Image: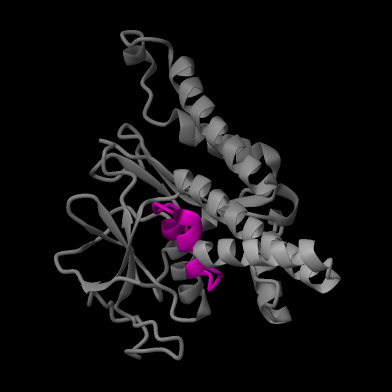
Amino acid sequence: MLYQSKSGAQQMVGQVGGVSVHKRPLLTLDPDYVLKPLQLDHRGIREIGFYEAVRTACQQGSVQSYAAFMGGIQLEATQALDVLAMYITLSLGDQSLTDSEQSILNSWRKLKKEAELLRRLQNYTALYYGVVEHNYIPSTAPSEEKTPYGVSVHSHLLLQDLTCHFSKPCVIDIKIGPQSYEPDAPDEKRAREVSKYPQQTEFGFRIVGMRIYDPSHEDACENGFRFFSKEFGRSLSARDALKSAFRTYFTAGINTSQAKDMVGTPSTIRTRSLSNILTQIRSIQSWFDD
């Protein structure tokens, strides 16, 4: 885990998800970084572990690196043990040694598959540069410097800003999955999460918020963006309402009269965007299937 101090970061303008008076905001840092505040409980540690595992799996000699990261057996030691165990097994026909050999090989195959899956997953995640400290603390943040899990209120994930190359980035935050609580969550938390959006069990996701570039709309801010909060997402109780929300997102900012001078119709432009997104979603679905 890389720990360093970062200065010069600014609060992200137009943050969509995770917006709350008691939450620390996302920060941006030139030229193309995002500082995401870590959760102060076990979730923060697990998030670090996830990104570190992905990064380790993508290194040269990734299977060996990932095995070491997971506390597994180094490749060289495994190969030597394989040869020795195979020799003894063939010589004596000892069933216990045969079982031990098979167990080692199965463990190695499992680690190899995990490393390969994590390499594939990096294609759909922002690049991760480590954990950094930044002392931007709003007045509503917790006052403790350290938590029982060792995560500081100054701790942030340093990630790639995926929107930095867009002139007018439109962003939608979707919470994927039929439930938004952990398997060991107490009943009161389960009930609280379900009450936020009961339809999530049926739809399998919910829109947390979105920002679209629509300068001609009366609700647009001075920079031409419209914002849709989590309350908007929770109000989408029917499938038609969800479809309408996606339609709003994918058609925002298109001026029909101006579009006649462009290559392709507005429908063609959005169809291309939707096609690209659907291709990525299908690839992610395939990853989960594997």
Instruction: Residue at 52% x, 53% y: name it.
Output: 118
Q: Looking at the image, which is closer to me, 271 or 72?
A: 72
Q: Looking at the image, which is closer to me, 223 or 45?
A: 45
Please state if 197 lies on the left or on the right of 20 as rendered: right
Instruction: Residue at 55% x, 69% y: name it.
Output: 73
Q: Looking at the image, which is closer to me, 203 or 165?
A: 165
Q: Is residue 220 above or below residue 114?
A: above
Please state if 191 lies on the left or on the right of 65 as rendered: right
Q: How is the image coloured?
A: one colour
Q: Residue furthest left?
A: 8
Report x, y in % for residue 49.
47, 69
First to last magenta residue range: 54-74
Q: Is residue 116 above or below residue 246?
A: below
Report x, y in % for residue 98.
79, 66
Residue 18: tell me if it is visible: no
Q: Is residue 115 above or below residue 101?
A: above
Please state if 183 lies on the left or on the right of 244 as rendered: right
Report x, y in % for residue 200.
68, 55
Instruction: Residue at 44% x, 50% y: name it.
Output: 125
Q: Residue furthest front?
A: 91
Q: Quadrant of residue 219?
A: top left
Instruction: Residue at 17% x, 54% y: name it.
Output: 30
